[in-house]
Image: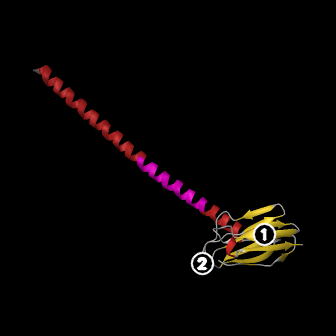
C-alpha cells in the first residue's frame, strides 16, 4: 500500500510539474504572439509611409513638368483634341486635361516617337507627358475604344 501511495504522490507531483511547464509554454507563446503583432504593426506603418512617399513622387512626375520644358495645353473630350497644330522642336511638356465625360488617353506618334500614358485619364483628371520633339509631322489621338474615329485625332507639325 505504501508503494501504491508513493506512486500516486509521484504521479500527482509529475502532473503538477507538467501543468506548470505548460503554463510557461503558453505564457511564452502569448508573449511571442504579442511581439509579433507589435512588429507587424510597425512594419505595416513603415510600408504605408514609404508607399505614400512613392505615390507622391509618381504624382509629381505625372503632374509637374520640367522647368526647361515648353508647356503645351491639351484638352481632350469625346469629339476633339484641343491643342496647337504647330510646335517648335525641343523638350515639350504636354499638359493634358480630360474635359470629357468618359476616360481618355493621349498618344503621340511620329519621327521615331510613340508615347501614351500607361493609365488613362478619368474625367477631370490631368497629367503631364514630356517628350523631345524633333522636326516633322506627328499624329496625336486618343487610342481608347473608337475615339479616334469620332474625331479625337489631330496632326501636329513641328519645326
Q: Position of residue 80 (x, y in %)?
A: 70, 78
Q: Does 3 sit left or right of 136 as displayed?
A: left
- Disc 2, SS: loop
As rendered, which of 120 and 92 lies closer to the eye?
120
129 lies above or below 16 = below
Q: Is residue 100 magenta?
A: no
6 lies above or below 149 = above
Q: Residue furthest front?
A: 149
- The mark nearer the N terminus, 2 or 1, is 2
Q: Residue at x 57, y 56 (%)?
A: 47
Q: Looking at the rendered structure, which numbered label has been put on residue 73?
A: none
Is any atom of residue 4 visible in this view?
A: yes
Q: Does 123 sit left or right of 29 as displayed?
A: right
Q: Does 100 sit left or right of 5 as displayed?
A: right
Q: Does 50 sit left or right of 68 as displayed?
A: left
Q: Which residue is mark 2?
A: 101
Range drawn in magenta: 33-51
- Say which quarter of the image contains residue 51: bottom right
Crowd rating for badge 1 (residues with CA inside 10 Å; few <14, some 14–19, many 20+): some
Q: Is residue 40 magenta?
A: yes
Q: Main secondary structure of the magenta part?
A: helix
Q: Residue at x 87, y 68 (%)?
A: 136
Q: Residue at x 61, y 76 (%)?
A: 123
Q: Position of residue 64 (x, y in %)?
A: 72, 71
Q: Position of residue 40 (x, y in %)?
A: 49, 52
Q: Looking at the rendered structure, which numbered label has been put on residue 139?
A: 1
Crowd rating for badge 2 (residues with CA inside 10 Å; few <14, some 14–19, many 20+): few
User: Mark 2 or mark 1: which is in front?
Assistant: 1
How many numbered markers are drawn? Answer: 2
- Disc 1, SS: strand
Q: Residue at x 69, y 71 (%)?
A: 148
- Say which quarter of the image contains residue 155: bottom right
Amino acid at each position: 500500500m505504501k508503494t501504491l501511495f508513493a506512486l500516486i504522490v509521484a504521479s500527482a507531483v509529475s502532473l503538477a510539474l507538467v501543468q506548470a511547464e505548460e503554463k510557461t509554454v503558453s505564457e511564452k507563446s502569448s508573449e511571442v504572439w504579442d511581439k509579433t503583432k507589435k512588429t507587424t504593426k510597425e512594419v505595416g506603418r513603415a510600408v504605408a509611409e514609404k508607399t505614400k512617399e512613392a505615390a507622391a513622387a509618381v504624382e509629381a512626375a505625372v503632374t509637374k513638368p520640367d522647368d526647361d520644358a515648353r508647356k503645351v495645353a491639351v484638352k481632350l473630350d469625346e469629339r476633339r483634341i484641343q491643342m496647337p497644330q504647330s510646335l517648335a522642336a525641343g523638350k515639350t511638356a504636354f499638359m493634358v486635361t480630360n474635359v470629357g465625360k468618359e476616360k481618355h488617353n493621349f498618344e503621340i506618334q511620329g519621327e521615331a516617337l510613340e508615347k501614351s500614358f500607361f493609365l488613362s485619364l478619368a474625367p477631370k483628371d490631368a497629367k503631364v507627358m514630356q517628350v523631345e520633339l524633333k522636326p516633322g509631322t506627328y499624329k496625336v489621338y486618343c487610342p481608347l475604344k473608337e475615339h479616334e474615329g469620332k474625331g479625337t485625332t489631330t496632326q501636329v507639325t513641328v519645326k
